[in-house]
Image: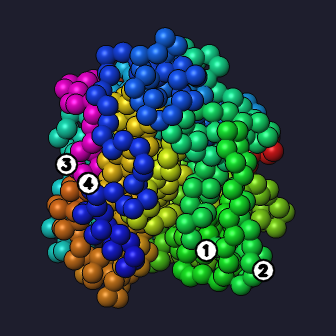
Amino acid sequence: MLRVILALALALVVDGFAPLSLRSGGRRSLSPPALARPVVFGGGAARRRSAAVSMEVVGEAAGGRPLKVAIAGGGVGGLTTALCMLKAGFDVTIYEKTSAFARFGGPIQFASNALSTLKAIDEGLFERVMTNFTFTGTRACGIKDGLRADGTFSMAGSNPWTAMNPKYLVDPEAPADWFVRFPLKACADLFGLPYTGVINRPDLQETLIDECVKLKPDFIQNGNPVDGYENLGDGLGVSIKLADGTTETADVLVGSDGIWSSVRAQMYVGAEPYIAATLETPCRLKRPSLAHAHTHTLTRTCMRVSPRYGEEIKGTSPDKMKRQGCSYSGYTVFAGETVLKTADYYETGYKVYIGPKRYFVTSDVGNGRVQWYAFFALPPGTKRAPSGWGGSTRTEAEEDDLVGYIKSLHEGWTDEVHYVLDNTPESSVEQRDLYDRVPELLRSWSDGSVTLIGDAVHPMMPNLGQGGCQAIEDAYVLTEVLKGVNDTAAVPEALSSFYRKRIVRTTIIQFLSRLASDLIINAFDTPWSPHDQKGTNWKSYLTFAWKPLLQYVIFPAQFAYLYSYYPSGSMGDLPAELDAKWKKKHFEDSERAFASVGTGKNTDIGESFLNAATKKEEVAA
């Protein structure tokens, strides 16, 4: 926690100052922006001249062409970057690991700041996302008492302050189930933005792909991911090594290949010692040999290092606390999904149940479905279910009453939690250890003509639902920065500018995302009540004392900051109109789903969205 606090403090002063690694030999001032037309650069012959000559003729050569951008990874961040850049007139190609697009994955949360960014990128994209969207921020969302919630919806109307009813102190009949409520709607209204909600990841990816295809039919190359790169220098861009052994060249390479990024592995692997199979013995690190570049061989001593583990791809420390430069958060999460009509299904968006050393989250994700997450402070590798991300498969031992195991960890908790678990099919439950990274305050996200975005450089805990949102912001800001470049020699400095524009905000949000888990697990407990003995330790008194500060100060400030980035500007009455239109459709779709499932345990939810991700990786392999 001390490292994170120090990182946050440093982030507040780093804006406007570049780390040493940002210094490059190229021109330090950007060329005048060319926003009214696609940015063009000199032809192939001009690009191979000296840097001095290139800077004079690019943009005016007879064979002028748009900026060529390669993107590693076709997830939400990569696809959004591709669409944003294609609309800016760039020549964009995504190199994706999987052999073909397949509908897989669960819902993804989009907060108001991400929706504003999508609208700024493309009006048509925003409209299509809204047709498949489920609003949660228009309804009651917040923290509930995991032990005292009684299964009824007791937060009247839309007033967030009913969670602070002072009658609770003197009247044992006053509702005690809601601890605090998140001011999602109020903060969105402050900026005139659409309300937070969720969309199915397959629907989102399908929409992004379709919009990109309209601009460039062959924009994505499947089954051939980026394995490495070599900066060519002198405004010549970057040579990219692909998995099949071939190479491609581009003016810019964007690493959007997730938390176990191969682009980041190369960018940072030489920046620090790393643990090899044989410790304290010489070892050789060989950079990929790429077109237009010599083979570079680096020799360094491999030694035991602490506390960071090296950046080699998926390299894991023996205790699993470090993996490819990422730190184990201290928490593992179980996730499941079911079709279930709860007593408050239409009145609540998402609920965070808090209790001793754990918390349980449920969310309406549309079409009658409830998705849940159970967070536990357990050592890494405490496996009870396949992860869906690491290529693991379900075993007979793991299938043995998994829901019963999770229920046992919530003994004495509210029936609201057990009702959801009792109606969850075993096949939908998965588990994942959560890793994140310390913000890169002393190293740039960029290396020459290569940069990183999204989870590849700032993975974060899921508590604020901002992982995908920040990747979308990255895509928009990076594109805006590159629009102002009309000389390939200026690309490295432009990418450094992108880093400086984004590092403070992403650092703060990484900090807040991690802080949420740390506080709930380590500092919060069942709140004290004068009417029972369920919360009597010092944490219970502290949790009770925090309540007014959280409700009136901390959460309003937190969500106002998250939503303060809104490149679309205020949307006026549009958010309310979208919500009104959605409510009728949501009710009809949900009732149809409830009728199709009937009563009793839901067995029709289908394959787990996490397990589907595993199959996606296996197809690519």
Residue found at the far bottom of this picture: 537
> Residue 393 at x, y = what percent?
79, 56
Cβ–Cβ below 8 Å for labels 4 and 2?
no
Q: Is residue 205 visible?
A: no
Of label 3 and label 1, which has the lower sequence position? 3
Foreground pick, 609 / 497: 497
> Residue 135 at x, y = what percent?
38, 36
Residue beneath disc 1: 273
Cβ–Cβ below 8 Å for labels 2 and 1?
no
Which range of residues does the magenta coloring cover? 560-577
Q: Which image quadrant for residue 404?
A: bottom right
Residue beneath disc 3: 159
Lateral position of residue 165 relative to residue 476, left or right: left
Q: Look at label 2 and name its amino acid.
A: Thr
- Mark whose residue sits in front, 2 or 3: 2
Q: In the picture, which quadrant includes the N terminus?
A: bottom left
Tell me the distance, in whole angstroms, between the alpha carbons under discs 4 and 2: 42 Å
Mark 3, other Cα within 10 Å: few <14 / some 14–19 / many ≥20: few
SS at mark 3?
A: loop
Of label 4 and label 2, which has the lower sequence position? 4
The residue under the point 23% across, 69% down is: 547
How many marks are shown on the rendered structure? 4
